[in-house]
Structures are given as C-alpha cells and as structure tokens.
Amino acid sequence: MAETDVQRRPIRGGLWGILLGLGLALLALNSKIISLSIVSLALVTVIGIVLGVAWGMFAPARPPKGPAPVGDAPVGEPGDGAPPVGDTESGESVPAPADDDPHGGS
C-alpha cells in the first residue's frame, strides 16, 4: 500500500499563534486578568505563538483529498493493463459513435 506524505505547517501555525496571542492578551487586559504592561502582553503573545507552532507541528493531519497513488506508471500509459481506446478483445477496431442530428430530422 502506498503511503501519503503528511505536510506540517509550523509557519502557518506561528502566524495564527500571533493572532491567538494578541487576542488572548486583549481579552485578558479587558477582563482585568492582567495589568497593562508591555511585558505581560508580550508574554501572553509569545505563549500564543508557541501554542500555534506546536499545533502546526503536532496536530492530527487532515485526511488526503484524493486516493493514494497506485503505482509508478502514469495513468494511461501502455502496459498499465487497460486496452487502448477503440480496441476489443478480438483485435477488431470499434468505430466511433456517430453524432446524432441535433434537430432530430434526416
């Protein structure tokens, strides 16, 4: 069975962590959990960044959007087991379907 590569995104997590940290700092400031000081606001922001990077690195990965690749040969290449278009098992060529008249008349 082919395995898919899991993409981790610590930079994206860090950017979202900045927003998380700033939001937590403003919430803590407005609800009077912390006092107004640069050190306390920066500390809460850094904690948010660390949480965001950790989430970007160690969070459960999303399932892949498509099926896993089956083999090394590209799809449609000769030798992949599929008969060429227009051929039958007896070796006779199958004619292409005729286009129907769009007006229905003859």
Image (cartoon, rainbow, N blue to C red):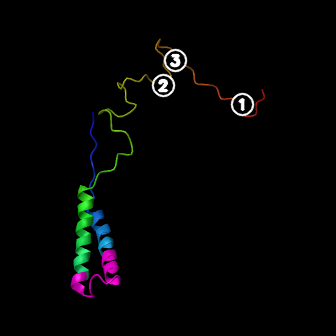
Residue at screen point 32% across, 67% down: 16
Q: Residues within 10 Å of mark 3 (few under 14, many from 20)?
A: few
Residue 101 marker? 1
Quarter of the image that includes the N terminus: top left
Name the residue that disc number 3 marks.
Answer: 93
Find residue 70 and report its horizontal and vertical position in percent.
Answer: 32, 33
Q: Amino acid at mark 2?
A: Val
Residue at screen point 26% across, 87% down: 35
CA–CA distance between discs 2 and 1?
24 Å
Name the residue that disc number 2 marks.
Answer: 85
Span colored in magenta: 22-40
CA–CA distance between discs 3 and 1?
24 Å
CA–CA distance between discs 3 and 2?
9 Å
16 w.r.t. 71: above or below = below
Figure quadrant of residue 95: top right
* Sequence-first disc among 3 and 1: 3
Closer to the camera in the image, 98 or 15: 15
Magenta stretch: dominant SS? helix
Quarter of the image that includes the C terminus: top right
Find residue 96 and report its horizontal and vertical position in percent.
Answer: 58, 24
Residue 41 marker? none
**Left or right: 105 as drawn, with respect to 73:** right
Q: At numbered mark 1, what does the secondary structure look like: helix, strand or loop?
A: loop
Q: Amino acid at mark 1?
A: Asp
Closer to the camera in the image, 28 or 100: 28
